Amino acid sequence: MKITKVKLKEIIQEELTKLKELETLGASDARKQARLQSKEVVASDVTSIERSAIVQLQKSLIAAARVKNIATGTVAALIKRLLGELEKMAPAATPTDAEG
C-alpha cells in the first residue's frame, strides 16, 4: 500500500497532537480520568486476569514515567504500537473516546 506525502504528513501531525495531549494532562485531569477508567473496568465484562494485566501495565508505566519521559523514544514507539493493536481489536474504544 502506497501512502502519499500528504497522507503521511497528516498521520504524523495527528500522532504529534496525541502526544502533546498526553504531555499536557494535568494532575486533576489524570485523577478524573483514572476514576472514570476504573469505573469502566469494574462495570464491564473484563475478567480478573485482564484487570490484573491492566493494573500491572499501568503501574509499570507510572514507575517508568517517574524515572524517564515515556512519551519519547523506544517506550513511546511501543505505546503507539500497542495502541494500534488495541485499536484493531476494539475500534470504538479509541483513547480520545475515553477522554470525553
Image (tube, rainbow, N blue to C red):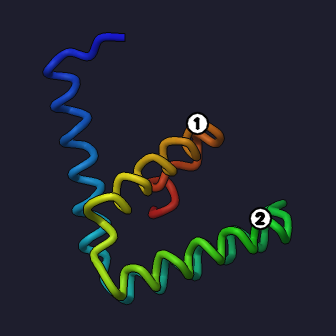
Residue 64 location, quadrant: bottom left
- Image spot of residue 30 (x, y percent): 42, 81
Residue 99 location, quadrant: bottom left
Say whether residue 10 is left or right of residue 71: left
Above/below status of 41 relative to 88: below
Above/below status of 47 relative to 32: above
Residue 88: mark in rendering: 1
Q: Neighbour class for label 1 at 10 Å: few (<14), some, many (≥20)?
A: few
- Image spot of residue 10 (x, y percent): 20, 32
Above/below status of 27 relative to 80: below
Residue type, label 2 = Glu
Which quadrant would the C terminus be assigned to in this image? bottom left
Residue type, label 1 = Lys
Residue 43: mark in rendering: none
Estimate the spatial distance between the alpha carbons at disc 1 and disc 2, rounded to whole Å: 17 Å
Extreme front residue here? 74
Pick whichever of labels 1 and 2 is earlier in the sequence: 2
Tag 1's secondary structure?
helix
Question: Residue sitting at 78 percent across and 63 percent down?
Answer: 44
Extreme top residue here? 1
Q: How many labels does the image show?
A: 2
Say whether residue 95 is left or right of residue 66: right
- Image spot of residue 33 (x, y percent): 49, 76
Question: Residue sitting at 77 percent across and 64 percent down?
Answer: 50
Question: Residue sitting at 38 percent across and 62 percent down?
Answer: 75
Q: Name the residue under label 2.
A: 50
Question: Residue sitting at 77 percent across and 74 percent down?
Answer: 42
